[in-house]
Amino acid sequence: MGAMSMDETATPDKGAETPFDALAAAAAATQAEGLPPVHLWNPDHCGDIQLEIRRDGGWFYQGSRIGRERLVRLFSRILRKDDDGQTYLVTPHEKVVVHVEVAPFLAVRVDMTEEAGTRRLFAETNVGDVIEISGDHPIWVERDCDTGEPVPLMRVRGRLDALFTRPAYFELVQHAEERDTSDGKVLGLAVGDSFFPLGAPGEHCV
């Protein structure tokens, strides 16, 4: 039998509360206006229950896709990437490893506004966050370790990044311009006092 999507009626174990159930309940308890202060939570217990976020933004638990969008959004609010480079779901009582293929979020849309002659660009993520592209939320381009293709990324919060989908990246490029640099003409995105190159991928690969 194939893996079952974890929709509103499917749970990992009908007979007893699982670690996943407990984590979902803890995530639901954090619902409030604004993001919970995950940077202040330092629980002793750390586990790995086989949670993963794949390149397409899909969340999986033990190989089964989590089909509840509301639950995915709740989990996204308690994500944290630590100094060790590992991403976790964090509650006041425990933190759970999340295996991230590329980035925990997807940037799925780009919008531009202009106020008093100043251009502002915003990226919307697959979990409903709207982030203004700026020096605090920069964009950059890495390269795919296997194909060498560009991998455009954006800092969302903390050390957590979003991968631009192809359509969203094309929207970015529509707002790009060429500038003369010491390396020659570079295609990039000018926002405020910042200029973010969108051309050749960086040295790192993902």
Image (tube, rainbow, N blue to C red):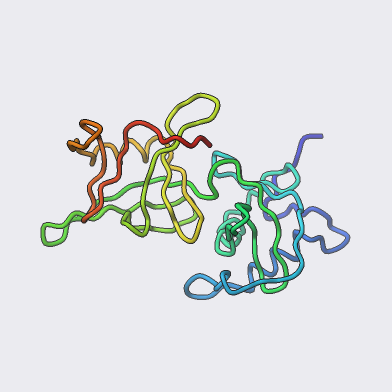
Q: Position of residue 200 (x, y in %)?
A: 35, 31
Q: Residue furthest front?
A: 182
Q: Residue furthest left?
A: 117
User: 141 above or below 104?
Assistant: above
Please state which of residues 163 and 125 is positioned toward the viewer in this rendering.
163
Give the quarter of the image for residue 101.
top right
Q: Residue furthest top?
A: 147
Q: Is residue 181 left or right of residue 52?
A: left
Please state which of residues 132 and 16 is positioned toward the viewer in this rendering.
132
Q: Position of residue 165 (x, y in %)?
A: 43, 39
Total number of numbered discs in the rendering:
0
Q: Position of residue 31 (x, y in %)?
A: 57, 72
Q: Is residue 172 left or right of residue 115?
A: right
For image coordinates 48% across by 37% down, the residue present is 204
Give the quarter of the image for residue 18.
bottom right
Quarter of the rendering occupied by the N terminus: top right
Q: Is residue 97 left or right of residue 194?
A: right
For image coordinates 72% across by 72% down, the residue present is 93
Give the quarter of the image for residue 11.
bottom right
For image coordinates 76% across by 53% down, the residue present is 49
Q: Position of residue 25 (x, y in %)?
A: 70, 68
User: 198 above or below 110?
Assistant: above
For image coordinates 36% across by 38% down, the residue present is 169
